[in-house]
Amino acid sequence: MEKRKQEGVIMKLSGAEIIINMLERQGITTVAGIPGGSTLPIYDALGKSSIKHILSRHEQGAGFIAQGMARTTGKAAVCLATSGPGVTNLLTAIADACLDSIPIIAITGQVTNSLIGTDAFQEVDTYGLTIPITKHNFLVQSCEDLLEVIPEAFRIAESGRPGPVVIDVPKNIQNEVIEIKSWPEPYIKDEPVMFNEDNMERALEMINKAERPVLYVGGGVIAGDAVKEVQEFSKRNSIPAVSTLMGLGVFKDSDPGFLGMLGMHGARYTNMVMEEADLLIALGVRFDDRAVGKSNEFCCHADIIHVDIDRSEIGKIKSSNLSVVGDVKLVLQDLCKSVPESSRLEWNNRVAEIRSSNPRQLPDSEDFFHPINVIHKISEFVPDNTVICTDVGQHQMWVAQHYPFCGPRTLLTSGGLGTMGFGLPSAIGAALADKERKVVCVSGDGSILMNIQELATLAEQQLNIKILIMNNNRLGLVRQQQELFFEGRYVASTFKSNPDFASVAAGFGIVSADLGSEDDPEAALGRLLSFDGPCLINIPIGFENNVFPMVPPECANREMIGG
């Protein structure tokens, strides 16, 4: 396409060629998708481009591959889908990105303009379907609009609170040819959202007055590139910190001031410390029910300072005494300059006392196949900068509780939507985004089957991904809740037929093993995690293992059971 990119020369290009040229100009080097009738012009143009196309085996897989790239880099990534079932297959990945504030651009084909609204073959109302699950969406009305829509989509996806954007392009617009004299500039990310200085003065007063403050950090700190600032602030004023699931990695697991994940499956000592706090400094969080439990009983003895870039999150679930709407990085930079150094000895001694008297739950036995022991062994065998992708279920919570994360963007997991099937394709995206890092996908026997077809994509790409399946022949978290809250009535939570996952992977041409058949499973795990290339490892675990502690549904965090 070099010839077509010459500036100052009138170029005759189709809408499809404009789309691909504009993606190149936005710095896109890889896209994921599946072609179909309404996107064939785009794919024809893509074939003449330097952009690498990853052929997923399901559009949901393509959406999660894009998420894996975006979650790893913080930059918007692109997926493609045809009209009708291609779009509807993509909806779950778009909704997942929306709830976790992930910047992806979904470019979808649409039937010809004249057929819209006629129930034409493979027609769905993409615009209407995606309004509730996107940050913004476009139904392109003319070929010329593409020159404005595409850079605008990237600006919207990455600026402020990130999120997904859909661009729906009718086939006739993809085929339409227009003359272009010059290309628009790539998007410019919006300037950071400034904050009210008066609010900052009041925030400092509240922090200096507090005797038992706690930092409550979420995924917004990672999205806002404010990890260094929040660590400095915590250390400077000796304020202990807790994290949401999406905020894991902001603090190193070994940081003495970090108390781990709070909420439904947080450590008992973490939730107990929160009960004694007199000031909660909430940074880039949305007070999700899995984190705060019964919201009207969450930190009811504490004043709350809520810092978020999205005004709509302020007061949505939990009222705050002071809200600061602005870029969390700028807010923390300002606080770090102004807040005095403090040891807070009395409070930190009390935190240490709570922690020592309520230690993290560890298995009673040294059985290698206990899931917590497996998590510990994985961390011993891989580098600190390994990207850990999880699916959704018990294995996800064991990883969140016990894996020692050492930095941001090392945990990729579906938080808000809780989507089974997220793990494998997002791991593929992570490996595509950073080929120098090892990627480990921890899944369950229920989750892996949701998008197991992406093993074909993995085999094709030969990426350095290790898939570990915690296999208990159950929908583990469903079974656990049926045991605890439904008097052991196990309905539709047991798999009477489960495949031999190692053989399935081998059928795709992927190295595989079943640790249940190994004489020395620990040595086998170390060996399999060490070589370069894709690998699937089946790990049988006991179905009786539960994730504890746990906050029962509709209960306050202090009402944890187990552990």
Image (cartoon, rainbow, N blue to C red):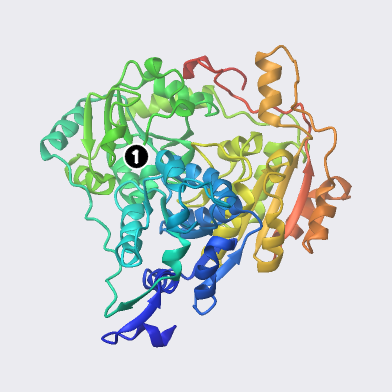
Residue drawn at x 30%, y 31% is 344
In the displayed structure, does residue 243 sit left or right of residue 561? Answer: left
Residue 282 placement (x, y as % from top left): 32, 33
Nearer to the camera, 40 or 408: 40
In the displayed structure, does residue 42 sit left or right of residue 131? Answer: right
Nearer to the camera, 268 or 262: 262
In the displayed structure, does residue 172 sit left or right of residue 324? Answer: right
Please tell me how crowded label 1 is: few (under 14), some (14-19), or many (20+) other residues with Cα within 10 Å.
many
Residue drawn at x 57%, y 36% is 401
Give the farthest residue toward the left: 198
Quadrant of residue 306 in the image?
A: top left
Nearer to the camera, 536 or 175: 175
Q: Quadrant of the C terminus?
A: top right
Residue drawn at x 21%, y 42% is 335
Which secondary structure lies at badge 1? loop
Which residue is identified by label 1?
284
In the displayed structure, does residue 502 sit left or right of residue 379? Answer: right
Is residue 62 among the parts visible in the rendering? yes
Residue 102 placement (x, y as % from top left): 43, 49
Residue drawn at x 50%, y 15% is 555
Give the farthest residue toward the top: 487
Residue 286 placement (x, y as % from top left): 37, 33
Amino acid on which disc 1 is placed: Gly
Q: Compared with residue 25, is residue 60 higher up or lower down, i.e. above or below?
A: above
Q: Compared with residue 172, is residue 11 higher up or lower down, i.e. above or below?
A: below
Nearer to the camera, 307 or 150: 150
